[in-house]
Amino acid sequence: MDPDAAIETRELTRVYRQRWRGREIRAVDGVSLKVARGTSFGLLGPNGAGKTTFVKLLLGIVRPTAGSATLFGVDCRRPEARLRVGYLPENHRLPSYWTGAGLLDFAGALSGMDARARRRRIAELLDLVGLQEWANVRLSRYSKGMLQRLGLAQALMHAPSLLLLDEPTDGVDPVGRQQIRAILRELEDQGVTVFLNSHLLSEVELACREVAIMDRGRLVLAGRVKDLTAGKGYLVTAAHVPEALFETLRAKAASAAMRDGLAEFLFPTREEANRAVDVVRAHGGWLESVTPTGSTLEEVFMRTVRPQTPEQL
């Protein structure tokens, strides 16, 4: 195992046995994954893919059937592996009679922080998540987005090196999601490793540098977001392109088409696209757009994940 990796798993497997049905369910099936320190990493997959079980294995909540997992080089089954981890579970429930500051104080005490350190850290975190004015207000008056931000603050109370977040923006309005993304970017800049478990593809694409996709317990794709969504060139669209010029450029382009009076050319490189733009303008054509081609993370996801049959749902 690599001690410099924030998370590393090798052939990690968790099997559940349904004795009454006489079958086994491989919730996590031979997953080998490495997450570098100080990066933002998103784990994607449809419902039932094994994402939450994978996180539970990292936290020692569930024991592996086979394989291994480490956090900063320490076996996940050992309690000390979790000392550097902050965790925000999905659909967390916070007692409504607590105040924001009271909750953070309790979380800090559980982490072994002394009273002076807790007071200082509470002020820092409430400022980070934008809840300074709500410090002494009971949680029953907090909105969903505010509770999510407070939950993030409690996960950060002991200044962890690794932050595990399970659907942190689920049910949060657009403004709240933007605020949470900004906080995560700031944490990454500070060297914190952010591991985001989600099925909200657009959020992961905006928040994470690297992703992995799980399907039916197995890891089916992993890499940098910019690499997975990279396109195959530049699409040049122009109007008033004479037929002769269209034929000339089509011979040089990877593909070409005429749609609603507009000529479209796909060029593999930026240099070729720029030369085509110069030619179009020199011949009196009107440039409409130059667009880098690419895929969204959702499109990559849909190409990668197999649809489930009714029997598998």
Image (cartoon, grey):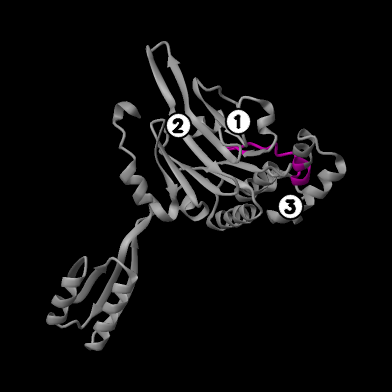
Residue 36 position in % (x across, y down): 55, 44
SS at circle 2: strand
Q: Position of residue 116 (x, y in %)?
A: 87, 44
Specify whether residue 171 is in view.
Answer: no
Q: On the image, which quarter does residue 230 sit in?
A: bottom left
Provide residue 266's location: percent of width, then percent of height. Answer: 25, 67
> Who is closer to the viewer here, 60 or 233?
233
Residue sitting at 31 percent across and 68 percent down?
A: 269
Query: Which numbered dot is residue 16?
Result: none
The answer to which of marks 1 and 2 sits earlier in the sequence is 2
How many angstroms separate mark 1 from mark 2 (CA)?
16 Å
- Mark 1, Cα crowd under 10 Å, few <14 / some 14-19 / many 20+, is many
Query: How far from the left and from the top, in percent, is residue 99?
Result: 76, 44
Q: Residues within 10 Å of mark 3 (few under 14, many from 20)?
A: many
Dot 2 corresponds to which residue? Answer: 31
Q: Secondary structure at mark 1?
A: loop
Does the magenta segment cover residue 103? yes
| Magenta span of residues | 88-104
